[in-house]
Image (cartoon, helix red, strand yellow):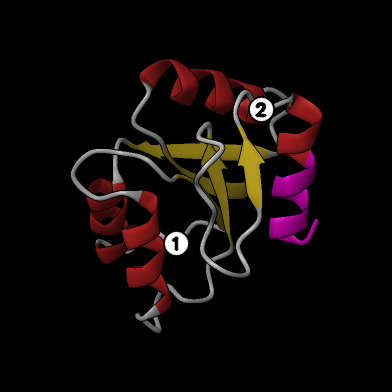
């Protein structure tokens, strides 16, 4: 089973993405409501196989979270896929982007590619 950390401030989106990914039993999904919560989970030793990260969130946005992860050798190797509804935002270089609303097939494809499965 692959472990995913979903970083998303919208609880409805959290629930729908978590449910979609956990439905077939191939993935377990932890959630965080912002980048600071996600970083705290990583600092406490959580090591997901990949992360889905919203760009626009309160407290710490996805861009700052990804930047901090890439500067820390402990987290730099965790694959990240960015989620965003805003058409003007662009992900950090080299980071795949899924535009909201997210189609299940696109979500599953991005997760499988990031996890290498």
Q: Nearer the viewer, residue 16 or 44?
A: 16
Q: Nearer the viewer, residue 72 or 29?
A: 72
For mark 2, give the secondary structure: loop
Which segment is the magenta one?
109-117
| Residue identifier under label 1 | 47
Compared with residue 103, is residue 88 higher up or lower down, i.e. above or below? below
Side of 14 relative to 110 (left or right): left
Count of numbered badges drawn on the protein? 2
Side of 105 relative to 8 (left or right): right
- Rendered location of residue 55, percent (x, y): 42, 45
State the image quarter where residue 16 is shown. top right
Compared with residue 18, is residue 58 higher up or lower down, i.e. above or below? below
Q: Nearer the viewer, residue 90 or 4?
A: 90
Compared with residue 24, is residue 98 higher up or lower down, i.e. above or below? below
Q: Is residue 45 magenta?
A: no
- Rendered location of residue 113, percent (x, y): 77, 56
| Residue identifier under label 2 | 102
Q: Which mark is residue 24?
A: none
For mark 1, give the secondary structure: loop
Compared with residue 69, is residue 7 higher up or lower down, i.e. above or below? above
- Rendered location of residue 68, percent (x, y): 32, 70
Which mark is in front, 1 or 2? 2
Q: Is residue 14 visible?
A: yes
- Rendered location of residue 39, percent (x, y): 28, 58
Q: Nearer the viewer, residue 32 or 95?
A: 95
Furthest-bottom residue in this view: 73
């Amino acid at each position: 089973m692959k472990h995913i950390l979903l970083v998303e401030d919208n609880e409805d989106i959290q629930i729908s993405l978590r449910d979609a990914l956990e439905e077939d039993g191939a993935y377990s999904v932890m959630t965080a409501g912002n980048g600071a919560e996600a970083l705290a989970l990583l600092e406490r030793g959580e090591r997901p196989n990949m992360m889905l990260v919203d760009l626009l969130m309160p407290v710490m946005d996805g861009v700052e979270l990804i930047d901090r992860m890439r500067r820390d050798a402990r987290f730099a190797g965790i694959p990240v896929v960015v989620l965003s509804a805003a058409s003007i935002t662009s992900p950090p270089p080299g980071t795949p982007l899924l535009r909201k609303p997210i189609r299940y097939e696109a979500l599953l494809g991005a997760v499988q590619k990031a996890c290498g499965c």
